[in-house]
């Protein structure tokens, strides 16, 4: 009898201590888009209609959710390589080797069309690169170098 009582008491203590943790996401949005982004050993995938938890971080990594425009380089055969990067002040820089002469930087908001126009900003030579600052880009922007 005492054995049963002690067993029941022990079982009750185990059940009391085995409680689920409380987790919550206080808000969410339904975002469009989708695709996969891969870098190094990490891959992040998203699909349309999934909740957006906003900003998540841990250790040295942060994942920001939300809507972004696309800023991309379109490599033209025979043209120098374009490099696009984000500065610490959230401006976008489009760069290519300064030794590449005779090329003009063009932009287009829709990749599949022929509506390419010259970028009005004159490139600045920074180190060994021509650089154009796009501050801040709104919507989609595709850049390419064109030989006249």
Image (cartoon, rainbow, N blue to C red):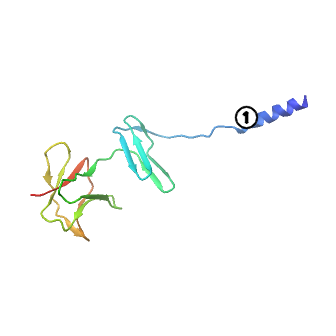
Near-viewer residue (108 or 39): 39
Q: Secondary structure at mark 1?
A: helix
User: Residue placed farthest to the left in the image?
Assistant: 148
Q: Does residue 140 lie above or below 59 as drawn?
A: above
Q: Point out the residue furthest to the front here.
A: 78
Q: Check the picture and name the quadrant holding the C terminus.
A: bottom left
In the picture, residue 22 is in which quadrant? top right
Name above or below for residue 10 compared with residue 144: above
User: Residue 120, how many percent across, how many down?
Assistant: 15, 58
Q: Position of residue 11 (x, y in %)?
A: 78, 33
Q: Is residue 77 left or right of residue 84?
A: left
In the foreground, 128 or 7: 128
Picture quarter containing residue 36?
top left
Residue at the location (26% across, 49% down)? 138
The answer to whether residue 10 is seen in the rendering is yes
Q: Residue furthest top?
A: 1
**Along the horizontal axis of the image, is 127 left or right of 58?**
left
Farthest residue toward the right?
1
Give me the residue at 54% from left, 40% from top: 24
Residue 131: tell me if it is visible: no
Q: Residue at coordinates 86% horizontally, 29% vertically from top-left? A: 4
In the rendered image, residue 60, in percent from the top left (x then y), is placed at 48, 57
Residue 97 placement, left or right of 6: left
**Residue 104 x, y percent position in the rendering:** 14, 59
Which residue matches tag 1?
15
Foreground residue, 122 or 47?
Answer: 47
Quadrant where the N terminus sits is: top right
**What is the count of numbered marks?**
1
| Number of residues whose C-alpha sits closer than 10 Å to that of mark 1, classed few (under 14), some (14–19) or many (20 or more) | few
């Amino acid at each position: 009898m005492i054995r049963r009582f002690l067993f029941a008491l022990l079982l009750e203590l185990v059940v009391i201590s085995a409680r689920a943790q409380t987790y919550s996401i206080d808000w969410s949005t339904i975002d469009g888009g989708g695709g996969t982004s891969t870098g190094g050993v990490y891959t992040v995938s998203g699909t349309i209609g999934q909740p957006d938890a906003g900003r998540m971080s841990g250790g040295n990594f942060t994942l920001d959710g939300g809507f972004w425009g696309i800023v991309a380089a379109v490599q033209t055969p025979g043209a120098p390589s374009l490099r696009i990067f984000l500065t610490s002040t959230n401006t976008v820089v489009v760069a290519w080797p300064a030794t590449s002469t005779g090329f003009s930087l063009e932009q287009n908001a829709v990749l599949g069309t022929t509506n390419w126009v010259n970028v009005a900003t004159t490139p600045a030579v920074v180190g060994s690169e021509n650089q154009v600052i796009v501050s801040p880009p709104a919507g989609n922007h595709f850049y390419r170098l064109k030989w006249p």
